Image (cartoon, grey):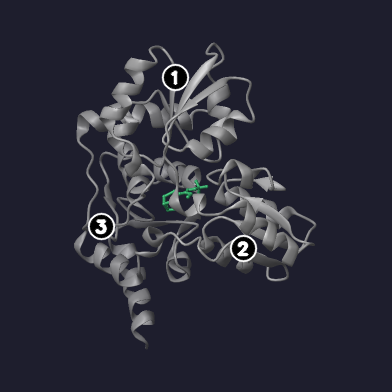
Amino acid sequence: MTESENNIQRIRELRIQRRAVILAHNYQSPAIQDIADYMGDSLELSRRAAATDAEVIVFCGVHFMAETAAILNPGKTVLLPHPNAGCPMADMITASDMITIRQKHPGIPIVTYVNSSAAVKAESTVCCTSANSVDVVHSFRDSRTVYMAPDRNLALYTARHTDKEVLYWHGYCPIHHSLTAKDVLAKKEEYPEALFIAHPECRPEVIELADEVRSTSGMLRFVKESSRDSFIVGTERGILYPMQKQNPDKKFYPASRKMICPDMKKTTLPHVLRALETLQPRIIVPEETRQRALVAVERMLSIGR
Ligand code: 13P
Ligand code: SF4
């Protein structure tokens, strides 16, 4: 048996012994995707975390995702197998920035992307993901204006689909923001028959060129249901693995070779195995912060997709 097969076998045994569930984001490495119980985008994984009866949640993703699972599951052990798997965009705003925003814009709902710390969520009116940002903004029927943080590109995308005024923080995802309109035009020239699908974290001028804009799981559904058979994919390259696996006869081209999130690739099988063996690294959110963040997360989950 190879070392990797050995790791997989041990992970399977420990998963049963620990009554654990393994959740993995669509950008994780193929080896992690293959051992996950559930894959998904941020919204789907939040819903899974809210619904699970497992005692241990092994979150193969980045810190804010595991923190969201911990916010929703105070009695459970939530593990982030690689302790330094973070999200640079989530680090672009702090709780004290949020307090300043509230003071500057009193009474305006603050819609916070789940790509944020628990402390930032705790200062928010509601959370949103790339799958539901428009629905969340529309849920504030009586507000003419909303404030979105931390992703300016998600805010600008959302603003295109609402007549509300959308104010926003200046954060961005370095991976999605690195994709330029020039990159996309070059790919479209190379593959003129392909549809271009983009993530809402991309720049507005890239969104402008997209045939479809979706969350990661939204993209997976779209390419499966589409009658077309080739796609230029404007998001992190990890998604090409499930896309190709689910659609062996279709063709997928990364919009740019630069779109690799190093944090999403930190988690390996040995990290998952060690996490199940030691029940570490554990994500713990201080109770007062957790309760306030929970209000924003639950409010989001109560809004339909
Ligand atoms: P999704 O919620 O669309 O999976 O996106 C999460 C993310 O981090 C995108 O960079
Ligand atoms: Fe954060 Fe961007 Fe990586 Fe997603 S792809 S986890 S937004 S840095």
Please state the horizontal and vertical placement of residue 136, each as a whole percent of the image.
Answer: 53, 27
Compute the Cα span from label 2 to label 1: 36 Å
Horizontally, residue 170 falls left or right of residue 194, namely left
What residue is rendered at 63% in x and 25% in y? Answer: 162
Q: Are marks 2 and 3 in contact (CB under 8 Å)?
A: no
> Which residue is painted at 55% across and 47% down in the image?
202
Asked which secondary structure carries label 2, the reply is helix
| Quadrant (top left/top right/bottom left/bottom right) for the C terminus | top right
Q: How dense is the environment of label 3, judged by Cα within 10 Å: few (below 14), some, or many (20 and up)?
A: some
In the foreground, 255 or 36? 255
The amino acid at mark 1 is Pro
Amino acid at circle 3: Pro
User: Between residues 117 and 188, which one lies in front from this camera angle?
Assistant: 188
Residue lying furthest front in this view?
182
Q: Is mark 1 within 8 Å of ligand 1?
A: no
Residue 113 relative to residue 104: left or right: right
For image coordinates 46% across by 41% down, the residue present is 47
What label sits on residue 243 in the rendered view?
Answer: 2
Amino acid tagged 2:
Met
Mark 3 and mark 1 lie on one chain; the one further toward the N terminus is 3
- The foreground one among 145 and 181 is 181
Q: Label 3, on which residue? A: 83
User: Could you tell me which secondary element the residue under label 1 belongs to?
Assistant: loop
- Please name which of the two marks, 3 or 1, marks the residue nearer to the observer: 1
The relative height of residue 180 versus residue 1 in the rendered view (above or below) is above
Residue identified by numbered label 1: 109
